[in-house]
Amino acid sequence: DTGVSQDPRHKITKRGQNVTFRCDPISEHNRLYWYRQTLGQGPEFLTYFQNEAQLEKSRLLSDRFSAERPKGSFSTLEIQRTEQGDSAMYLCASSPRDRGYEQYFGPGTRLTVT
Amino acid sequence: AQTVTQSQPEMSVQEAETVTLSCTYDTSENNYYLFWYKQPPSRQMILVIRQEAYKQQNATENRFSVNFQKAAKSFSLKISDSQLGDTAMYFCASNTGTASKLTFGTGTRLQVTL
C-alpha cells in the first residue's frame, strides 16, 4: 500500500506566474485535504474533498487558489498570479472511508516564489 | 472553533530517557479526536497516536502514550526510552470527528541526544 504522493516536491517560480500541484491519495481513500505550512508553524487547513465534491474551503483560500478532484482520485491545487507570501509547504492528506478522523499526509510540495 | 496550544517550542532529552510534550486545546464540541503527529527533518508528517474524546482510557502505541485530561483540556505525549530517530517536530492536533479538518498547534521541536 503506497502512501500519499505529491508532485512536484519542490517548485521555484517568479512572482506573477501560475503553478499547479498534484496529490495522489492512498488508494480507496475517499477524502482528501490540502494544508499549507509556513516555516515554524503547524499546517493550516485550505480545503477538503469527499470523492469529487469540494465540501469546505478556508478563508485562507483566496480567489487566486483553486482546487479540483475531478474523478474522486487525484487532486490538483492551482495558484494563479503567485505572490511572495504564497511561499510555503503545501501538504496533502487523505483519510479512509471507515476511519475518516485519521489523516495520512504526503511529503509536501515546497513552493518558493521569487 | 477549535484551538490547540503547544507551549514548549523546543525540548531536549537524552537517549533512553523519558520526555513529555504538553498540549492544551479548546473546543465546544462533545465529539472530537486528538492526535500527535511527528514531522522528521525530511518533512513527512507521520501519525503517532490518536485519542478519542469519549474514551477515558489513555491511548498507547509502543513507546508512545498520552495523558488525556478531558476536564482540563490537556493532552500530553510521553515518549519512553527515547531514540535518536525520535528527533523531530511534534504537532498536537484535533478535529471534530469524521471528515473534519485538523487544527494544529505550533509544534515542539524535540532533540534526542547521546
Image: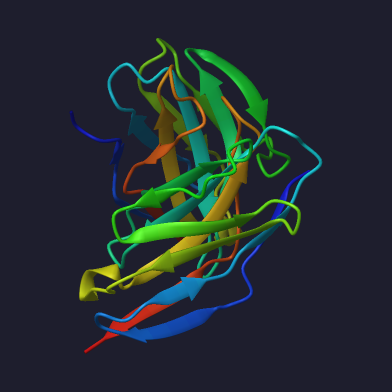
On the picture, is B94 further left or further right than B18? Answer: right
- Residue at (73, 40) in percent of width and height: A59
- Residue at (30, 35) in percent of width and height: A4
Percent position of residue B41, x then y: 30, 68
On the picture, is A110 further left or further right than A43? Answer: left
Front residue (pair A56, A29): A29
Q: Is residue B29 visible?
A: yes
Percent position of residue B84, x then y: 22, 76
B16 lies above or below A50:
below
Percent position of residue A105, x then y: 38, 42
- The image quadrant where one finds the N terminus of chain A is top left
- Residue at (36, 17) in percent of width and height: A73
Residue A95 appears in which quarter of the rendering?
A: top left
Front residue (pair A5, B32): B32
Residue B43 appears in which quarter of the rendering?
A: bottom left
Front residue (pair B44, B91): B91
Percent position of residue B106, x then y: 59, 65
